[in-house]
Image: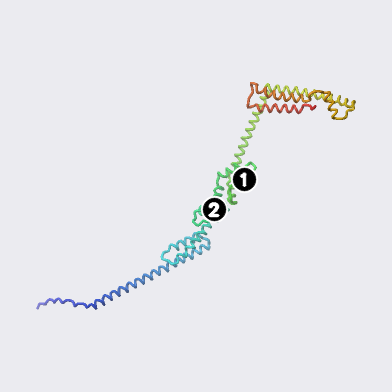
């Protein structure tokens, strides 16, 4: 017997109460899930913060140890790493330490530059000084610039050559023998001055040789000038005017010898006369001498001075006159006539 199809039975309607209970249960389940998620998330965030704080604390502790050892670069690196850690509550503790480490780092650069200068490591010192001047925490800028300028001058070949060229021969010899500088060298610090002295010593031989060459040139020039002067004097002595002077001098010397002989005879006669007349007063003797002689006792001097003017004028009107030799000719004339005047007898 064929089966009969099942009849469509409509679902039984839910009651409002049952629907509310199901909705409440679902909402409660969702709330529990969200609450648990938020709790787990908060716990995870707290764990992350704790881990981050622990990392920061480790970096700060390590940085303190590096600072105690004055290893400022390492200390700064650890403190910067500490500040770079996210999600922390103790990161700000690193900031004052970082500022302190940077200040100490800057000061250490300046101190190291001073030591480098003392050990004559000019390249290292200049590198350290430039690093210090560029450091944001540098506070002794004036001193650093002074040291840098001193070093720049101390290692300058041009400055060394310029100072050596300025020194006198005595000052150069004093530096060559004992390293003592008597002139201002423009250096403000003792250590930089020692470096400058080393630079000066490198250029010393060159300066000494330059001066020796200059002196040799001057000596040869002086020898040449002396030879030229001898030649000029010989040429001037061979001029008609000077030959006239030479003849006059010979004549005056002969007259001088005759006058000396006459004066001796005259003095003997006057002495005998004073004895006969019993004249002992020098003033009275002088008066009698003047009355008896009755002549110009300066006749020779007058002749010489007149000849001096005459000879100088004669040369200047002569055909061979050279204006460049005028002063030398006058000097030669004066020398010869001044010697003649010293030979003339005093009356």
> Looking at the picture, how far across and down is residue 298, in whole percent?
77, 25
Residue nearest the observer in this picture, 1 or 303: 303
x 65%, y 26%: residue: 326
Relative vertical location of residue 2 with respect to residue 107 in this rendering, above or below: below
Q: Which circle, 1 or 2, is nearer the viewer?
A: 2
Q: Name the side, left or right, on which 1 lies relative to 254.
A: left
Q: Name the side, left or right, on which 75 lies relative to 4.
A: right
Q: CA distance from mark 1 to mark 2?
A: 25 Å
Number of numbered discs present? Answer: 2
| Residue position for label 1 | 183
Image quadrant of residue 272? Answer: top right
Instruction: Give the structural element (helix, strand or loop) at label 1.
Output: loop
Relative vertical location of residue 55 with respect to residue 293 in this rendering, above or below: below
Residue nearest the observer in this picture, 82 or 140: 140
Image quadrant of residue 319? Answer: top right
> Looking at the picture, how far across and down is residue 338, in whole percent?
73, 28
Residue nearest the observer in this picture, 178 or 246: 246
Task: Check residue 317 in the rendering and tell me which mark sits there, or answer none.
Answer: none
* Quadrant showing the C terminus: top right
| Residue position for label 2 | 142
x 32%, y 72%: residue: 34
> Looking at the picture, how far across and down is residue 28, in whole percent?
30, 75
- Answer whether labels 1 and 2 touch (C-beta < 8 Å): no
């Amino acid at each position: 017997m064929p089966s009969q199809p099942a009849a469509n039975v409509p679902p039984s309607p839910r009651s409002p109460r049952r629907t509310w209970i199901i909705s409440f249960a679902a909402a409660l389940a969702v709330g529990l899930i969200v609450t648990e998620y938020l709790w787990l998330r908060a716990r995870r965030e707290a764990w992350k913060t704790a881990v981050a704080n622990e990392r920061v604390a480790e970096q700060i502790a390590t940085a303190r140890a590096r600072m105690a050892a004055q290893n400022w670069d390492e200390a700064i690196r650890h403190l910067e790493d500490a500040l770079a850690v996210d999600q922390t509550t103790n990161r700000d503790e690193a900031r004052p330490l970082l500022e302190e480490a940077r200040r100490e780092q800057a000061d250490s650069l300046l101190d190291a530059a001073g030591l480098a200068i003392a050990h004559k490591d000019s390249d290292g010192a200049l590198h350290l000084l430039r690093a210090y001047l560029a450091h944001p925490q540098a506070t002794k800028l004036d001193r650093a610039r002074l040291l840098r300028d001193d070093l720049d001058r101390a290692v300058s070949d041009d400055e060394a050559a310029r100072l050596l060229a300025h020194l006198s021969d005595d000052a150069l010899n004093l530096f060559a023998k004992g390293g003592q500088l008597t002139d201002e060298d423009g250096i403000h610090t003792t250590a930089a001055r020692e470096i400058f002295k080393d630079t000066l010593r490198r250029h010393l031989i060159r300066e000494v040789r330059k001066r020796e060459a200059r002196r040799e040139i001057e000596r040869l020039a002086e020898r040449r000038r002396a030879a030229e002067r001898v030649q000029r004097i010989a040429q001037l002595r061979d001029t008609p005017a000077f030959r006239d002077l030479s003849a006059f001098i010979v004549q005056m010397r002969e007259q001088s010898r005759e006058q000396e002989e006459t004066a001796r005879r005259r003095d003997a006669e006057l002495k005998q006369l004073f004895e006969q007349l019993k004249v002992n007063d020098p003033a009275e003797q002088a008066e009698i001498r003047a009355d008896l002689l009755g002549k110009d006792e300066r006749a020779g001097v007058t002749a010489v001075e007149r000849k001096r003017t005459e000879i100088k004028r004669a040369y200047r009107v002569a055909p061979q006159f050279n204006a460049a030799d005028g002063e030398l000719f006058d000097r030669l004339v004066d020398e010869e006539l001044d010697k003649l005047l010293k030979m003339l007898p005093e009356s």
